[in-house]
Image (cartoon, helix red, strand yellow):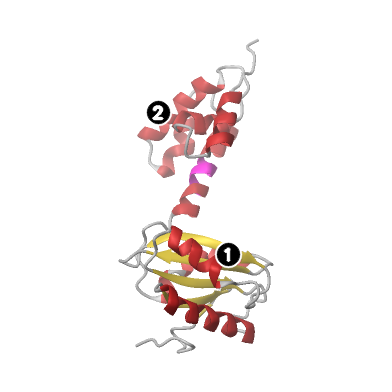
């Protein structure tokens, strides 16, 4: 009976010390797997999985992984799930935003939360998404959303413009008085900072509200 070889502790320590961008692909796969099995050690399994990923389309990953002797459904699904989560979380990068509705698919996952999340989406000069930042979690008001938090992140991203967004757990997308007041406060600060705020969008599960489309504080012209 072969020993089950646990995940190499050096890989974990490397990721903890240097961040997730530091390990190479096989080591990331080792972190996903956690351990090998009776038939192969985790490092050997990681190499085999990497080879399969290099040769597979996304819809074939689970089937092709399970075709490798020693890789069962649990390991195959874990790898496929990690790939899908990464795609969902990073699918927004470099997407061009031409109108308010373009941003909605990338923030819709927050609509199902029972807590209010205030987001800031940074854009480059071509209005392509640089990053989506969670600024705060809780009821939106001027005291919670300080211009310093918004524009410090925008400056780090070297953003030319940004879009504000938050969810309404109630499912009602109409802006509250606090929503309007906080947005007005940030618009005033944006003039000083020289970073345009293009819109503020409120999302719920099946609809959204755009300040621009409704000519609220912004002009759609």
Residue at 51% in and 23% down: 45
Residue indicated by mark 1:
135
Q: Residues within 10 Å of mark 2 (few under 14, many from 20)?
A: few
Residue 74 found in image quarter: top right
Q: Position of residue 185 (x, y in %)?
A: 54, 81
Q: Give the label on residue 71, or none.
A: none
Given residues 36 and 149, the one toward you in this image is: 149
Magenta run includes residue 4: no
Residue 218 coordinates in the image, percent (x, y): 44, 86
Q: Position of residue 31 (x, y in %)?
A: 57, 32
- Is any atom of residue 221 visible in this view? yes
Magenta part of the protein: which range? 80-84
In this view, the mark in front (1 or 2): 1
Indicate whether residue 83 is drawn in magenta.
Answer: yes
Residue at 45%, 24% (x, y): give it: 47
Badge 1 marks a residue whose secondary structure is strand
Q: In terms of secondary structure, where does tag 2 sit?
A: helix
Magenta stretch, main secondary structure, is: helix
Asked if the residue at tag 2 contacts the one at tag 1, i.e. Cβ–Cβ closer than 8 Å, the answer is no
Location of residue 204 with respect to 44 vertically, above or below: below
Mark 1, Cα crowd under 10 Å, few <14 / some 14-19 / many 20+, is: some
- Please tell me which of labels 1 and 2 falls first in the chain: 2
């Amino acid at each position: 009976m072969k020993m089950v070889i646990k995940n190499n502790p050096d890989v974990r320590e490397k990721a903890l010390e240097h961040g997730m961008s530091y390990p190479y692909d096989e080591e990331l796969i080792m972190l996903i797997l956690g351990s090998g099995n009776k038939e192969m050690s985790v490092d050997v399994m990681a190499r085999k999985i990497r080879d399969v990923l290099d040769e597979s389309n996304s819809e074939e990953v689970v089937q092709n992984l399970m075709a490798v002797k020693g890789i069962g459904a649990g390991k195959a699904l874990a790898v496929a799930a990690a790939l899908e989560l990464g795609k969902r979380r990073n699918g927004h990068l470099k997407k061009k935003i031409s109108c308010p509705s373009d941003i909605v698919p990338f923030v819709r996952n927050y609509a199902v939360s029972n807590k209010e999340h205030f987001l800031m989406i940074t854009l480059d000069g071509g209005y392509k998404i640089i990053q989506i930042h969670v600024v705060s979690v809780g009821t939106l008001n001027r005291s919670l959303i300080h211009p310093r938090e918004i524009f410090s992140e925008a400056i780090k991203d070297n953003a030319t413009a940004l879009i504000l967004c938050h969810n309404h757990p109630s499912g009602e997308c109409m802006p509250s008085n606090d929503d309007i007041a906080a947005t007005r406060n940030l618009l005033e600060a944006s003039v000083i900072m020289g970073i345009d705020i293009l819109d503020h969008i409120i999302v719920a599960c099946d609809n959204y509200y755009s300040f621009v489309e409704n000519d609220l504080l912004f002009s759609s012209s």
